[in-house]
Amino acid sequence: MSKSSTTTKGRESAARLPAIHPGEHLIDEMEEIGLPPAQMAASSLKKQPDVLSAADRTQAEAHPRAIGCRLKELREALGLRQAQFAERVGLSATTYNNYEVGLSRPDIENALRIARALRVGLDWIYLGQERQVPQDIYDLIIEYRKRKQDAAQE
C-alpha cells in the first residue's frame, strides 16, 4: 500500500467537503497582530492563493494565533466553555486560554493531551491538516462554520 493511500484512509468523502484551514477571518486576525513578513504572506491568500509557498503556509498555520483559532473553533463547535474544554483535556483554564488567544502554542505534552481527548492529530493542532480530524469532528466544525456564517449574514 502506498504512503498516500494510507494517509487518506477513512476520508473517502474528504474531496467533496470544504478544507479546514484558516479562512479570511483568520488571515485578517493574523494581519492585525502584526506577524513577521514570511507569515504576512498569508494575506496574499485572499487574492492570489497560488503565491504562498508551502513553507510560508506551514509557518502561518503553525503560528500560535492560528493554532488558537483552530482550538477555539473546535471548542465552540463542541458547545463547550473554555473551562469545560480545558478540564476535558486535562489542562488548567489559564494554560488553555493562553493557547486559544495565541499567547503561546501547546508544547508537545499538552498537544498530545488535546489530541487524545479530542481524537484529533497533532498535524491538525499544529498545521491545520484536516486529514487528521475524524469525520464526526470534521462534520461538527463544518456545521458550526455554516451556523456562524448564517448568523453573520442576518
Image: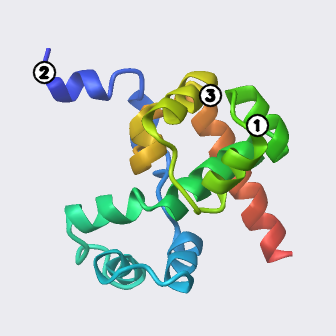
Residue neighbourhood size for the residue with mark 2, other residues' Cα within 10 Å, grouped as few (<14), some (14–19), many (≥20): few
- Pointer 1 and pointer 2: residues touching (CB < 8 Å)? no
Mark 2 vs 3, N-terminal side: 2
Compare residues 129 and 117 and report the one nearer the observer: 117
Q: Which mark is residue 154?
A: none
Q: Label 2 belongs to which residue?
A: 2
Q: Position of residue 81 (x, y in %)?
A: 85, 45
Please indicate, yes or no, whether residue 120 appears anywhere in the rendered image: no
User: The disc labelled 3 sits on which kind of residue?
Assistant: Leu
Give the residue at mark 3. Answer: 118
Task: Report the residue at 74% width, 49% height from top.
Answer: 94
> Looking at the image, can residue 77 be seen?
yes
Side of 118 relative to 36 (left or right): right
Q: Quadrant of the C terminus?
A: bottom right
Q: Secondary structure at mark 2?
A: loop
Residue at mark 1:
85
